[in-house]
Image: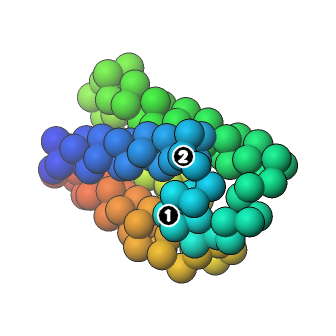
Amino acid sequence: MRTFSIVLLLIIAIEHLFIAFLEMTANPKKQAKAFGVDVEFLKQADARISMANQGIYNAMLAVIIILGQWVFTGTNTIYANLLFSSFVSVVGFFGGLTVNKKIYFVQMTPGLIALIISCMSLYM
């Protein structure tokens, strides 16, 4: 169960690296399609800066998740995974609520699954 939890979190980290890449480097047309935001809005300088800023947060979340698998040992890895999957779930919930309902499926659901599996791995 612990291994499954780690694998899920690493998949989530890879997903966040991909999201960060889109937010930081993709052109406005690709961003509009990926995130369901108006392309004209994304062409604005302030929106470009905001997307890049959001991208660095997603990149850092991915880096923390990945490093956490090697920095922490034993039960501490599970506690770290609980924290990381909680972050992803809360952010996914807020994103689904405020930006696009698709985020519930793409971000929040994997985070919740990882959270449940991490909880189960404490007792198995």
Q: Is residue 77 above or below residue 98?
A: above
Residue placed under numbered mark 1 in the picture: 34
Q: Is residue 67 left or right of residue 122?
A: right
Alpha carbon distance from label 1 to label 2: 10 Å
Look at the numbered disc 2 and give the secondary structure of its residue: loop
Instruction: Give yes or no for contact between labels 1 and 2 (Cβ–Cβ under 8 Å).
Output: yes
Q: Amino acid at mark 2?
A: Ala
- Residue 95 x/y as whole percent: 61, 67
- Residue 28 x/y as whole percent: 62, 55
Q: Residues within 10 Å of mark 2 (few under 14, many from 20)?
A: some
Q: Is residue 58 above or below residue 33?
A: above
Q: Amino acid at mark 1?
A: Ala
Judging depth in this view, the residue of 46 and 94 nearest the camera is 46
Q: Is residue 73 left or right of residue 98?
A: left
Q: Residues within 10 Å of mark 1 (few under 14, many from 20)?
A: few
Look at the numbered disc 1 and give the secondary structure of its residue: helix
Q: Is residue 87 left or right of residue 123?
A: right
Judging depth in this view, the residue of 100 and 11 nearest the camera is 100
Residue placed under numbered mark 2 in the picture: 26
Q: Residue at x 35, y 42 (%)?
A: 14
